[in-house]
Image (cartoon, rainbow, N blue to C red):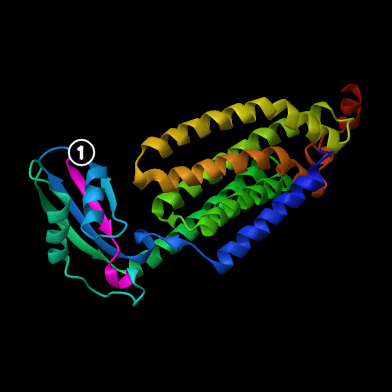
Amino acid sequence: MAARHVTLGVFIALMAVAVFALATKGFNYGLDFTGGTVVEIEFEKAADVEGIRGRLEASGFDNPIVQTFGSGNDIVIRLQPPEVAEGTGPVESAPTQQAGAEILAAAQTADNPGKVVRSDFVGPQIGNELALNGVYAAIFVALGFLAYIAIRFEFKFAIASVVATLGDILLVCGWFALNQHEFDLTVLAGILSVMGFSINDKIVVFDRVRENFRMLSKLEPKEVLNRSINQTLSRTIITSFVAFLTILALYLYGGNSLKGMAESQMIGIVIGTLSSILVACPILLLLGVTKQDLMPKAKADVEAELARRP
């Protein structure tokens, strides 16, 4: 807590950089948000996802998204239309059957032929709807967190935890805006999961803060917050480290289709852990939290009970 002014200053500065990057560069939206061609292919044998992706790129299909679904023989391929990729404007329709045949010819091999099960064109309007739904989901989650913590703890705790968590999400979004890594639905899913991880970390710390305010009522709020952070420090770091190792394995071995989600989760785990230790409690102190906020007001013998406590 002695370094709270420095940590809050750094946190605010990083958020300002993230806002600037989002305002000036924006996201590099993937096919999920821009529209494109979707082709489902069923192969006779288990398909090699990386091999298919390499053959499609060699045939001139830029940035193909190749994923398995169902069994290992079923592949879904998503491609951005050349008209959109070259910036000549949105496309209202596409020759899906011809595109499906061309994609199949590039993806299959002589020893593992396939057949096109479905070939559709995803318009930009659908991408806009997906982006809007993602914003709605983030707002719904934030409001749910705010309501839960306000009921379970106290409103100042809810404000501090939600502000710190939204700051974490802003920094993750700023990271993707700065480096222009592709932003698709898997990245959005990763960001929403980061919200859950970050708020859970802060609830653990705040739960200890609540206990210490009631048990160590004669201490100043700053010292209570200090003790609470230190008492939960090892748990916070160990839990975050194990979670980071799990996501790192997903990033290294999960394939290109999951790299964006894993990247958002790794960045979010690091930022969320640091904000739980260095940002959430300083915000709570700025809001003026005291032991009276958590004490039962209806009991007549509250002061006598407090006097007996250490």
Q: Is residue 15 above or below residue 278?
A: below
Left or right of residue 61: residue 25: right
Q: Residue at x 59, y 40 (%)?
A: 270
Residue at which label 1 appears: 72
Residue 44: percent from the left, percent from the top? Answer: 9, 41
Specify the segment rendered in magenta.
Answer: 72-84
* Quarter the C terminus occupies: top right
Residue 236: percent from the left, percent from the top? Answer: 63, 30
Q: Residue at x 69, y 28 (%)?
A: 232
Q: Is residue 203 visible?
A: yes
Of all residues, the one furthest to the front in this rendering is 58
Q: Residue at x 34, y 77 (%)?
A: 88
* Residue 47 in which image quadrant: top left
Observer-nearest residue: 189 or 48? 48
All told, the count of numbered labels is 1
Q: Is residue 89 rendered magenta in the image?
A: no
Left or right of residue 47: residue 26: right
Q: Is residue 73 rendered magenta in the image?
A: yes
Q: Amino acid at mark 1?
A: Gly
Left or right of residue 141: residue 101: left
Q: Is residue 98 above or below residue 47?
A: below
Residue 226: percent from the left, percent from the top? Answer: 80, 33
Q: Residue at x 13, y 64 (%)?
A: 97
Q: Is residue 128 above or below residue 290?
A: below
Of all residues, the one furthest to the bottom in this rendering is 88
Residue 196: percent from the left, percent from the top? Answer: 54, 42
Observer-nearest residue: 37 or 64? 64
Q: Is residue 69 visible?
A: no
Q: Secondary structure at mark 1?
A: loop
